[in-house]
Amino acid sequence: MIHKNITHILIVRLTALGDIVNTAIVLQLIKRFYTDKNEEVKIDWLCEEVFAPLIQNHHDINQVHTINLKKLKKERSFSLLKHEVKKLKNLVNYTQIIDMQGLLKSAIVSRMIGKNIHGYDKASTREGIASIFYKTTSTINYHDSIVYRNAKLASEAIGYTLQENDIRLKTKVLPSQTKPTFLDTTPTYAVFIIGASWPSKCYPKEKFAQLALELGVPIVLVWGSEQEKNDASWIKETCNNHDNHQIIIPQKLSLPQLSATIEYSLITIGNDTGPTHMAWGLNRPSITLFGPTNERMIYPTPINRFINSSSEVNISKINKNDFSIEDISVDSIVTLVQEIL
């Protein structure tokens, strides 16, 4: 049983990688708020099992709980359903549950754990029906930065007035990891994130190859699928036709290894996808390339910049057939790298 003088909060953010990174800022906000009041707080986190290693050792998290909704959806197993429901029912009686995801599935999962849930109101999230499961809600413009929305939601849940510097002057939102051994001999390198969740978010491999040559530093090509691995191999082969250029294609990285690779990099350049957002979470320089989406997906800083294509983006109705990212020039990326570094 939790002592009555200890506030015990559960953060519900089930998926996905980038969203978990952009949500993790709330940990330090909550911790600081209660520390300033000389009160003790414990923060647990609930996410899909596959993402747990990313935040497992975070110093502000008391315990990471996992759920297998993706596996449940795939297998349609009643016994697995019973197992997952039992896990949720056995969680402690939380002082506060904050549904950071704002979807029907996350709201239902939250409600199975407890009743004191805070989330977005009907007008502030893509699946407004989720709001019927919440005890209290926040009204936050859906078009605002995802990072700001997360910070604002958590702040209102605990009764804290969010300040601009709370986000701008954040500490790292992800735990530090041990430097990967394959990087021991390359202390200065750039990371390219060449994949994304759908093709129109991907910068062309031909332009990534050109960018690698123009930057003139060792490049680590991160991949997460066979197609991305093949693209990485193509980029390496293309660049190997030029002298004195080093392209590194590591084995498929675990989430902690990926985090470490980005944390020790000179800069990360990539598509609008989770690994690119990790650079912001680690306070490392980055450039995010946008086509069918835009900078709402990040929180720009002097070292975390972005380049939009010429598309008019409607974030409420994303056009997955918008391949305008292909029109972003390599020269514009090189110029921005020079400005940042």
Image (cartoon, helix red, strand yellow):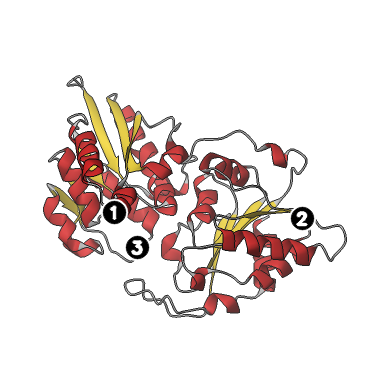
Q: CA distance from mark 1 to mark 3?
A: 31 Å
Identified at 21% across, 58% down, the residue is 139
Sequence-first disc among 1 and 3: 1
> In the image shown, does 135 or 206 lie closer to the viewer?
206
In the image, residue 63 above or below residue 169 = above
User: Where in the figure is residue 113, as x and y percent of width and height?
Assistant: 18, 38
User: Where in the figure is residue 63, as x and y percent of width and height?
Assistant: 34, 30
Which label number is shown at residue 73?
1
Q: Left or right: 218 with respect to 275?
A: right
Q: Quadrant of residue 131?
A: bottom left
Q: Amino acid at mark 1?
A: Lys
Q: Amino acid at mark 3?
A: Asp
Identified at 26% across, 52% down, the residue is 76
Between circles 1 and 3, the one closer to the viewer is 1
Q: CA distance from mark 2 to mark 1?
A: 44 Å
Residue 159 in sight in this render = no
For mark 3, give the secondary structure: loop
Q: Amino acid at mark 2?
A: Val
Sequence-first disc among 2 and 3: 3
Q: Quadrant of residue 103?
A: bottom left
Sequence-first disc among 2 and 1: 1
Q: Which residue matches tag 3?
A: 144
Q: Which residue matches tag 2?
A: 217
- Quadrant housing the N terminus: top left
